[in-house]
Amino acid sequence: MRKSEGYPLPVLEIATKEDVPEIVDQMIAASSNNNLILQLRYPSPEHLAKMDIRMRKVFTSMIEAPDYIMLKAVDPETKVIAATAAWQFVHFKDAELASVTGRKQHADERLVMQPQVIIAAGLVLNDGTSDQDETGGPTIWDVIEEAYQKFIKAWMGSTKSIYLASLSTHPRFQRRGIGTALLTWGHELADKHGVPSFLVSTPFGHPLYEHLGWRDVERPLKLELQKWAPYASNGDMGWGTFKYYYMLRMPKNAIV
Ligand SMILES: CC(C)(COP(=O)(O)OP(=O)(O)OC[C@H]1O[C@@H](n2cnc3c(N)ncnc32)[C@H](O)[C@@H]1OP(=O)(O)O)[C@@H](O)C(=O)NCCC(=O)NCCS
């Protein structure tokens, strides 16, 4: 029996600005349990508090931007936001965007996501966090962003496509099929429009994406976390290798 059997199906809805504080809490809870990358990015409660404020700004402007949809999965019993997925519709025409997002717009009124942010595997990369490396060398964030830019340039370029910027399920609701439901929503749209989908994955999402037909299109980026964790300089202290995967899903009925 699949673990997800026996749980009520989540209700999928497009998130609104009012949902943002709850969404940020849900995302932080989903990632903070096991994501050493986030520990490096936000090593103290003060950093986390700043991240909370920044993420609220980023996701509010994402919800207003015409080419993004923040999809929320609501638990029907508790009405809690159990999981979210942020989908970006790249190079879609205005009319197509309006039909997907349900928002009316005119070309001259186009809203651009402010500030322009880069989100890969749910990590907001250029969020204003102080990234300075004391030695003047690249930081771990430079390395992650460079690999992301290379992937985007090589694979997405001017291709009409759908990009999964973020997918996360609150730990309390994981392994119930909610991540699958949020992905299936995007897969159906991609199939309808006959476009490929792209994402950058953490190790936590990778088995799920593979299971649902995504495949790696680049070698994963391997980060030896010990190198980047200043407080691990006296030994390994459990910091291992963290991988980012670069993935593609072709639409059904595509000629490959
Ligand atoms: C990845 C994530 C979104 C999955 O969400 P979820 O709602 O638990 O996903 P599902 O319940 O639909 O999982 C479906 C299948 O994926 C696989 N899967 C999910 N989590 C897994 C895990 N931790 N280990 C192994 N397989 C896993 C299983 O095959 C699972 O099916 P099963 O429960 O019947 O065995 C969730 O673990 C999460 O939020 N992780 C932290 C944030 C993150 O890294 N997100 C990915 C960014 S790219």
Image (cartoon, rainbow, N blue to C red):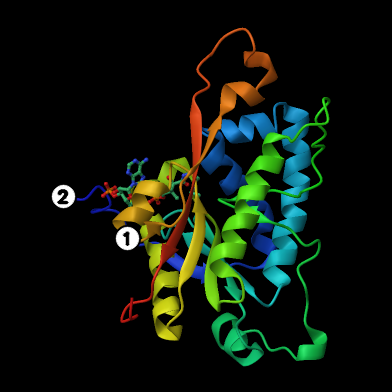
Tell me which amino acid carries mark 2. Answer: Met
Circle on res. 1: 2
Residue 190 seen by the camera: yes
Q: Residue at x 39, y 76 (%)?
A: 188
Q: Nearer the viewer, residue 109 or 163?
A: 163
Q: Residue at x 65, y 84 (%)?
A: 103
Q: Is mark 2 within 8 Å of ligand 1?
A: no
Q: CA distance from mark 2 to mark 1?
A: 18 Å
Question: Where, by quadrant of the figure, is residue 91 drawn?
Answer: bottom right
* Position of the C terminus by quadrant: bottom left
The answer to the question of whether label 2 and label 1 lie on touching residues, with beta carbons closer than 8 A, is no
Label 1 Cα crowd, 10 Å radius (few <14 / some 14-19 / many 20+): some
Circle on res. 212: 1
Looking at the image, residue 137 lies above or below residue 251: above
Q: Nearer the viewer, residue 192 or 236?
A: 236
Residue 231, given in percent of the width and then of the height, sits at 67, 15
Looking at the image, residue 12 lies above or below residue 234: below
Q: Is mark 1 within 8 Å of ligand 1?
A: no
